[in-house]
Image (cartoon, rainbow, N blue to C red):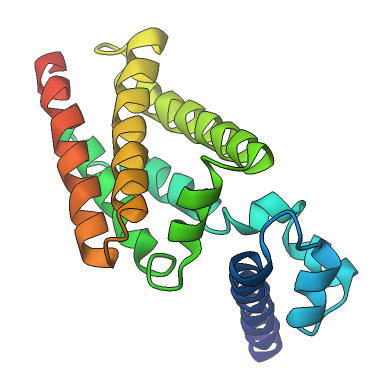
Amino acid sequence: MPDDVGRRERKKLLTRQALVDAAVRLFTERGYDETAVADIAEAADVSKRTFFLHFATKEDVLLADGGVRIDLAVQAIEGRRPGAPIREVLAEATTCMIANTAGELPNGLAALRARLVVTTPAVQARVLHTMFVAQTRIAAALRKAYPDLLDEVTAAGVVGALTGAISAAAVASLQLGEPPEPTRAAMRHAAEIALDYVETLA
């Protein structure tokens, strides 16, 4: 049974990656608006039903790993060492999130998303919604971890500043056509700028 479960999970991950790869290729070659869900499914050699088992919308393909990064940040906060200062915990959460981009920076997904977010309203709306969900979850975890130091508004402000700085730096770097490592460096630099303020909270 464990082997069967493992095989199913691997197959699921391979199918999901095939859909992402197909979408990146088709969006690049044909254009985002000109590519339908059926086109992506066909290119990945799966049915439309299978596509919707993995992604709710076409826009969600561009955010394939977003939920994983939110989970990593929340886990870093919840798993903090006793007495750890807020800056240290947020720095660890940031490191985990940026490290997770290693898979999508080289395959062109992040660069494609950066281009589409400024040209395609549907993508822009989905990205903004995803950022809002991420910020809300991370801020709630941070507030719960430091109830004596942070109120809801301050926690939201700190997380918004941090995630906003990282996202803005990533988009700017990708739009310049920079390769993965300089892009990650830009994200880390932006995080440091935002984290400097956090030191005044504890």
Question: Does residue 84 show up?
Answer: no
Question: What x and y, as percent, mark residue 194?
Answer: 20, 29
Say above or below: 112 vs 77.
below
Say above or below: 121 vs 23.
above
Report the quarter where the C terminus lies.
top left
Q: Residue at 68% across / 73% down in the picture?
A: 19
Question: What x and y, as percent, mark residue 113?
Answer: 51, 53
Q: Residue at 46% across / 49% down in the picture?
A: 114
Question: Does residue 24 show up?
Answer: yes
155 left or right, relative to 54 = left
Q: Nearer the viewer, residue 34 or 39?
A: 34
Say above or below: 60 vs 35.
above
45 left or right, relative to 129 = right
12 left or right, relative to 78 = right
Question: What x and y, as percent, mark residue 61?
Answer: 64, 59
User: Which quadrant of the view contains residue 174?
Assistant: bottom left
Report the quarter where the N terminus lies.
bottom right
Q: Nearer the viewer, residue 172 or 151?
A: 172
Question: What x and y, as percent, mark residue 104?
Answer: 44, 66
User: Which quadrant of the view contains residue 168?
Assistant: top left
Q: Nearer the viewer, residue 44 or 66?
A: 44
Q: Residue at 36% across / 51% down in the picture?
A: 175
Q: Residue at 65% across / 36% down in the picture?
A: 121
For the image, the number of numbered tags is 0
